[in-house]
Amino acid sequence: MSAAYKYFISYLYEDGGGNVDITLEEPIQSIDDIRGIEKAISDEFNLGDSVTIQNFIKLNY
């Protein structure tokens, strides 16, 4: 069984902001990881190209 990395993510987009929790197979380590998460949020919630992650916190549970 592989480790799971859970994060709380706060983001902004063109019309406001939001937050989500996500589970990843690998920890966030680079700006490319963050850009990929922005794209995933954008695709999931149909937000266009305007998603910007403001903050993320690794959850310990």
Image: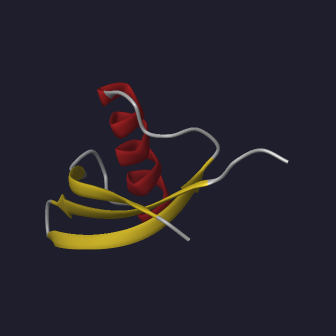
Camera-nearest residue between 22 and 35: 22
Q: Which quadrant of the view contains residue 33?
A: top left
Q: Position of residue 40 (x, y in %)?
A: 47, 49
Say left or right for 10 vs 3. left
| Residue drawn 49% across the image and 60% down it | 44
> Where 18 falls versus 53 (above or below)?
below
Residue projecting furthest to the right: 1
Above or below — where is 12 with respect to 29?
Answer: below
Q: Residue at coordinates 21% horizontally, 56% vertically from top-left?
A: 55
Tell me residue 52's x, y (percent).
20, 49
Colour setting: secondary structure
The image quadrant where one finds the C terminus is bottom right
Residue visible at 40% across and 43% down?
A: 39
16 to the left or right of 49:
left
Tell me what residue is drawn at x 49 percent, y 66 percent.
60
Please count the marks in the image: 0
Does residue 15 lie above or below 52 as drawn? below
Of 31 and 5, nearer the camera is 5
On the image, the x and y values in percent for residue 42 come to 38, 53
Furthest-front residue in this view = 60
Q: Nearer the viewer, residue 5 or 45?
A: 5
Q: Is residue 52 left or right of residue 46?
A: left
